């Protein structure tokens, strides 16, 4: 059985509110389809690197996050190039960027 999914626009708005409450700067870098768009999450470490996460569905149907670009933070230029490529592939993609130099943001699902 698969989990019920929130609309992308609702999930993004919820994350913006959570970040606001945690005093983390967050912005929608790109708006995608409000209902069916997927979300790419960029955690900008403000040191020239970023962590990128994309949602995936596990074998059990549960939502997970997968680290894009490798196991470590990647240079900002590489992150921006990755995002551009993904937008070219999926025009419905949302991009949520969170400035998180201290690693305080908590993902809402486990990393795969």
Image: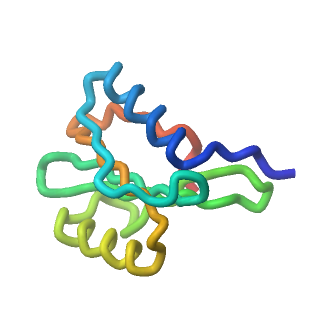
From this view, report whether residue 69 is shown above or below residue 29: below
Q: Is residue 65 left or right of residue 40?
A: right
Closer-to-camera residue (108/20): 20
- Point out residue 63 in the picture as x, y percentages from the top left corner: 66, 51
Q: Quadrant of the C terminus?
A: bottom right
Give the farthest residue toward the right. 1
Give the farthest residue toward the top. 21
Q: Residue at x 19, y 63 (%)?
A: 76
Q: Quadrant of residue 75?
A: bottom left
Closer-to-camera residue (67/19): 19
Closer-to-camera residue (38/79): 38
- Point out residue 103 in the picture as x, y percentages from the top left corner: 30, 37
Q: Quadrant of residue 60?
A: bottom right
From this view, report whether residue 27 is shown above or below residue 57: above
Q: Is residue 36 left or right of residue 91?
A: right
Number of callouts in the render? 0
Q: Quadrant of residue 81?
A: bottom left
- Point out residue 41 in the picture as x, y percentages from the top left corner: 40, 52
- Point out residue 106 in the picture as x, y percentages from the top left corner: 44, 34
Q: Is residue 40 left or right of residue 104?
A: right
Q: Residue at x 33, y 53 (%)?
A: 42
Q: Residue at x 70, y 59 (%)?
A: 58
Give the farthest residue toward the front. 34
Closer-to-camera residue (10/1): 10
From this view, report whether residue 69 is shown above or below residue 17: below
Q: In the rendered view, how is the structure colored?
A: rainbow
Q: Residue at x 53, y 39 (%)?
A: 10
């Amino acid at each position: 059985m698969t989990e019920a999914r929130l609309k992308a626009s609702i999930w993004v708005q919820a994350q913006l509110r959570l970040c606001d409450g945690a005093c983390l700067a967050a912005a929608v870098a790109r708006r995608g389809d409000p209902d069916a768009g997927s979300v790419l999450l960029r955690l900008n470490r403000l040191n020239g690197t970023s962590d990128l996460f994309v949602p995936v569905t596990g074998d059990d149907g549960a939502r997970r996050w997968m680290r894009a670009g490798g196991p470590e933070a990647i240079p900002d230029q590489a992150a921006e190039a990755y995002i551009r490529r993904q937008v070219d592939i999926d025009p419905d993609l949302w991009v949520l960027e969170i400035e998180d130099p201290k690693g305080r943001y908590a993902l809402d699902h486990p990393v795969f």
